Image (spheres, helix red, strand yellow):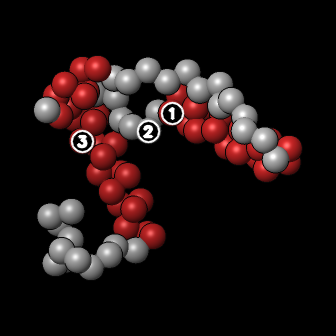
Amino acid sequence: MKQWWVPGLQIGYEHSFVHQVADFLQALGDGKPCRPTFRDALESDKVCEAVLKSAATGKWQKTKVDWKPDVKAVAKKK
């Protein structure tokens, strides 16, 4: 965000694509996977399916999400 204008002003929809490309190129240069991955998308899709089924049935649904935190990434943030 340091490349944009003053803090407090929002960026537009089109700028999110600029950030997406920047994140991809940074990950490529660092030799690391870029997020979100296809697995992230699959897990998000499972949540969306559960939401739609819940809306149709009026009941809570299990998401069937196979989510395990990336322990190494969490440890690096601390």
Q: CA distance from mark 1 to mark 2?
A: 6 Å
Residue 38 visible to an observer of this rendering: no
Quarter assignment of residue 70: top left
Secondary structure of the residue carrying numbered label 2: loop
Q: Is residue 49 left or right of residue 7?
A: right
Q: Which residue does the image show at 36% across and 51% down from the upper left? A: 21
Position of residue 50 relative to residue 68, above or below, is: below
Amino acid type of the residue tagged 3 in the rendering: Gln
Q: Position of residue 22 (x, y in %)?
A: 29, 51
Residue at 44%, 20% in the rendered image? 68
Helix, strand, or loop for circle 3? helix
Q: Position of residue 3 (x, y in %)?
A: 17, 66
Instruction: Look at the image and tell me in which quarter the C terminus lies.
Output: top left
Q: Residue at 29%, 20% (x, y): give it.
A: 71
Foreground pick, 29 / 62: 62
1 and 2 marks in contact (CB < 8 Å) = yes
Query: In front: 70, or 28?
Result: 70
Q: Which residue is mark 2?
A: 36
Q: Position of residue 36 (x, y in %)?
A: 44, 38
Q: Which residue is mark 3?
A: 26
Image side of residue 33 versus residue 57, left or right: left
Residue at x 60%, y 32% (from the top left corner) = 42
Kindly identify the amino acid type of the residue bearing the numbered disc 1: Asp
Label 1 belongs to which residue? 40
Tell me which label, 3 or 2, sits earlier in the chain. 3
Of residues 37 and 24, the one drawn nearer to the viewer in this rendering: 37
